[in-house]
Image (spheres, rainbow, N blue to C red):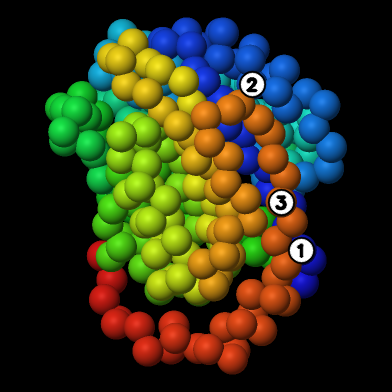
Amino acid sequence: MNNLRITTVQSTLHWENVEANLEAFDLKIRTLESTDIIILPETFTTGFSMNAEQIAQPMDGLTMQWLSKQAATHQAVVTGSFIAKEKGKCYNRLVWMRPDGTYEVYDKHHLFTLAGEEKVYTAGQKKLITEWKGWKICPMVCYDLRFPGWSRNMEDYDLLLYIANWPEKRSHHWKSLLIARAIENQCYLAGVNRVGEDKNGLVYSGDTTVIDYNGKKYFEISHEEGVFTTELKYEDLHTFRSKLNFLADRDEVRI
């Protein structure tokens, strides 16, 4: 099985300004060399806004067009979430855009009630397990990280992704929980967060990281913007699982 190259993009965000954010991300990844997946933060076109009705976009809108173009240009999956509106409802929707223009979506399941997210967004009810280059991948969004039952590796996925707008004041939780999710699910994990300050005065330190199945960090970047590519080794993961097959003893509990 081939190794997988993933590119994590840590960036500040322009508040509720879709065009400015798309232009900024285009510049960040324009010169990107060969990769298989490009991972952007949660609500990468607007920041984590509760003004969903005013700024939500349709599924044939500017963000979807941009994702499709970028995936085709880089011949890689491009993923991130944006504020989508469909059939009269708003979603914090992660899109898994492939180079051929086909895509899958995951609607954030655990909505952040401390910010009133559940009052303006509709929660998703279905996990997304997708495949790319022979790898089985599970993408999730921010607050989902706090709920291990939702991400439990019942599907034998190889890579778990969390994209986020996770404030610096709870960065210890972010760092600790990412390691825990990687170890307990015996998988590679990428956590992609934003940096900067939003219009609500929340500061974000980023702390974007890639972690292996044994809880070892490949890197962790705080406060600065950047584009970071990491190669994940399929055989190393499955050799580790065969030697320490903890997943065989997991609770058969599905959510």
Type of amino acid under label 3:
Thr
Give the x, y percent position of residue 1.
77, 72
Q: Which mark is residue 25?
A: 2
Residue at 41 percent of width and 63 percent of height: 181
Which marked residue is nearer to the observer: mark 2 or mark 3? Answer: 3
Residue at 32 percent of width and 21 percent of height: 202
- Residue carrying label 1: 3
Q: Secondary structure at mark 1?
A: loop
Type of amino acid under label 2:
Phe
Q: In the rendered view of the protein, which quadrant contains the C terminus? A: bottom left
Residue at 51 percent of width and 67 percent of height: 215
Judged left or right of residue 82, residue 22 is: right
Give the x, y percent position of residue 64.
56, 24
In depth, the one of 200 and 70 nearer the eye is: 200
Type of amino acid under label 1:
Asn
C-alpha span from label 1 to label 2 = 25 Å
- Residue carrying label 3: 230
Q: Quadrant of residue 51?
A: top left
Sequence order check, earlier mark of 1 and 3: 1
In depth, the one of 83 and 28 nearer the eye is: 28
Give the x, y percent position of residue 147.
27, 57
Sequence order check, earlier mark of 1 and 2: 1
Sequence order check, earlier mark of 2 and 3: 2
